[in-house]
Image (cartoon, grey):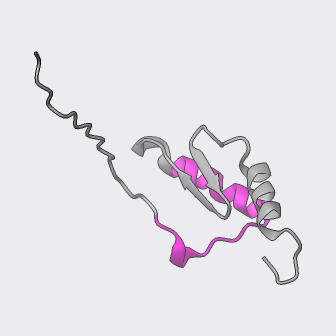
Amino acid sequence: MPFGVKNGPPRYQRIMTKAFRKYLDNFMKIFLDDFIMYSDMESHLQKLRLCFQKCKEHGISLNLDKCAFMIFFTIACILLFPKKEIT
């Protein structure tokens, strides 16, 4: 975002939302200037290609030093309940 641009972050958010509207909540989430894509292994490369095409169409440049590709993780949520005496 160039210096002196009024309302820079909201404007950028609108550009990102408009560019990727078709993919939002399908396999992509956007927060300001960051986006994350999620999918299964078979379709992930195809979805990356779609994303790169949209970036090119809308003039959105990517900083490859800040990009991470093919990151696999699992979130485990463990609920612990206190043991109560039954009387």
What main secondary structure does the magenta stretch of the protein show?
helix
Return the residue found at the far bottom: 3
**Quarter of the image containing the C terminus?**
top left
Residue closest to the eye, 52 or 32: 32
- Between 34 and 77, the one nearer to me in the picture: 77
Residue 55 appears at what percent x and percent y? 71, 61
Is 60 colored magenta in this rendering? yes
The residue depicted at 55 percent of the width and 75 percent of the height is 64
Above or below 22: residue 13 = below
The answer to which of 60 and 35 lies nearer the viewer is: 35
59 sits left or right of 52 in the view: right
Q: In which quarter of the image is residue 78?
A: top left
From the viewer's perspective, is 21 left or right of 48? right
Quarter holding the N terminus?
Answer: bottom right
Q: Residue at point 74% right, 56% down?
A: 16
Q: Does the magenta-highlighted stretch encompass residue 54? A: yes
Q: Against 15, is 68 above or below?
A: below
- On screen, residue 57 versus residue 28, left or right, reads right
Q: Which residue is drawn at 80% across and 55% down?
A: 14
Instruction: Give the residues drawn in magenta, as a range.
Output: 45-68
Q: Is residue 16 above or below residue 67?
A: above
Which residue is situated farthest in the top direction here?
A: 87
| Residue 4 at x, y percent in the picture | 88, 82
Q: Based on the displayed image, in which of its 4 quarters is residue 82 positioned?
A: top left
For residue 28, side relative to residue 53 (left or right): left
Q: Relative to the observer, which residue lies in front, 53 or 84?
A: 84
